[in-house]
Amino acid sequence: MTGSNIIDLTPEMLAAAAESKAWPFEEAKKVIARYKGKDFPETVLFETGYGPSGLPHIGTFGEVARTTMVRHAFRVLTQDKVKTKLLCFSDDMDGMRKIPESVPDRAALEPYLHMPLTSVPNPFGGDYASFADHNNAMLCRFLDTFGFDYEFASATQYYKAGRFDEVLRRAAERYDEIMGVMLPTLGPERQATYSPFLPISPKSGRVLYVPMINVDAKAGTITFDDEGTETTVPVTGGRVKLQWKPDFGMRWAALGVDFEMFGKDHQTNAAIYDRICNILGGRAPEHFVYELFLDEEGQKISKSKGNGLTIDEWLTYAPTESLGLYMYQRPRQAKKLYFDVIPKAVDEYYAFLGAYPRQDWKERLGNPVWHMHDGSPPAIDLPVPFALLLNLVSASNAHDKAVLWGFISRHAPGVTPKTHPELDRLTGYAIRYFDDFVKPTKVYRAADEVEREALAKLSDALGALPQGADGEAIQNAALNVARKIERYQDHSKQSPEGGPGVSVAFFQMIYQVLIGQERGPRFGSFAALYGIAETRALIERALAGQLAA
């Protein structure tokens, strides 16, 4: 997801891109439409924001990854003739409103409350000058790890270097217009003290939330009470910053931002950001509002609560690409982000990757892997799905990859860790995921009389199969057993012979009794990988009461 690779543009791909309904193309078309009838600027600017009061997290990854996808779609639609840039902007001039729980010595930071984050000492050690510098460095390391192509921007540096001075003077000139936008959004008490300008106190260095005594548009200064002293400072040179809502609009106007996405929690403020931007002489960027992530209970994920998954947790149990897929899919729908979603995301990623070479360009541009890999998805052969690996770990109680490879190599001759390094990587993820999330929740149950008879007949049917029978033959043998047992007949389905079909309850029973889980992948595929003899031995142990003991 670099966003800076050379794009191989073919007539077929360009034609498909022009018609594509994939959401990155839809968003990119909005950016193109904003310049209809006029020239593009020297650089079309895509922006993401970051609050350095905490370390970068899974939402940061999602925002940068999704913006990178839109940027790449824009490059394709413009035949890569327009220069683009992704700016990752850190709001590091914000005051530290509260001391994070994660710092080593919270008491040591108390004297620095309400100071800009770049003025708060670094509590983590190392060579970083401030709390914000440390977190900014972590952001850059984080983005570099994933290969994103971006330019980092610090609010403190931009304010102090005068990058915003012209627009800040304009804000002083149009102070009343800005207040006219902001005051109706506030309660009476807040209205009485509100100012879009937040001076940095020359006395204490703190970010002050104080009303203005005077705003001199001609001089470009503000006057306020600084702890009992009437003080006047210029709005330029980093002596003042803007409240966060006006700051959004000011930044867009000053930098000429063309595209910025944000979470649904910003949606009600988007119109405010836009109006401030317009007041300050800019044109509001194109927006994309994405839904928020929820935890297992359906609650919004919060850094302070620590609910939901962190990016480190996801990447402990699955490859980065699976997370990229999860970010691509249905961004306008709220999605739960907890451990149970990982296996499905992994298998879906490899399924999309496997389908890509067989697709025409229309289908390819609707395939998530095209967007995730800047139009160049890798060619990976994955003979065993991740869900199947998890069930293999579960059935075999494997604690190292060598055990799993014994089953895999027997099932697929010639497939080794050297020939299939991606599969080898997944075996490690499968063992970790099983140990931490599947094993603690496994509950075997004893089979009742009907189930015991069904399992015994299943074992006999497996034993009658020829050596080397594949997953399809095993699945058909299992279905033939179930069709003759009334409990597992599904009369809404029809068998090839015209009789009733098979209820999913049959395979649920197999996994509950043999694996200790509620569900699993296709039984035939599992038994072929695990081995017919091993599957029959597992049935034997279940019937002997050794699993549910």
Image (cartoon, rainbow, N blue to C red):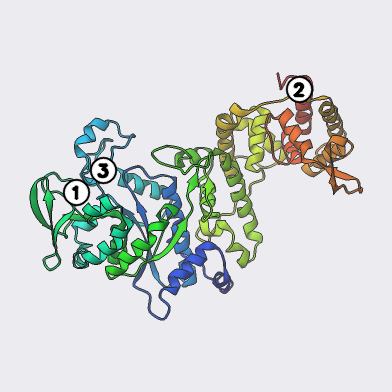
For residue 201, say whether it is visible: yes
Q: Where does label 2 land, which residue?
A: 541
Question: Which of the marked residues, 3 or 1, is nearer the chain's N terminus?
Answer: 3
> On the image, which quarter does residue 318 sit in?
top right
Q: Is 302 in front, or is 375?
A: 302
For residue 152, say whether it is visible: no
CA separation in Å, label 3 and label 1: 11 Å
For the point 75% across and 29% down, the residue is: 534
- What amino acid is labelled 1 in the image? Leu
3 or 1: mark nearer the eye: 1
Instruction: For mark 1, give the secondary structure.
Output: loop
* Furthest-front residue in this view: 188
For the point 47% across and 67% down, the residue is: 28
- With respect to residue 452, does 91 lie above or below? below
> On the image, which quarter does residue 261 sit in?
bottom left
Disc marking residue 267: none
Q: Where does label 3 land, which residue?
A: 96
- What amino acid is labelled 2 in the image? Arg
Question: How many numbered marks are there?
Answer: 3
For the point 38% across and 75% down, the residue is: 40
* Labels 3 and 1 touching (C-beta < 8 A): no
Q: Is 271 in front, or is 296?
A: 271
Disc marking residue 208: 1
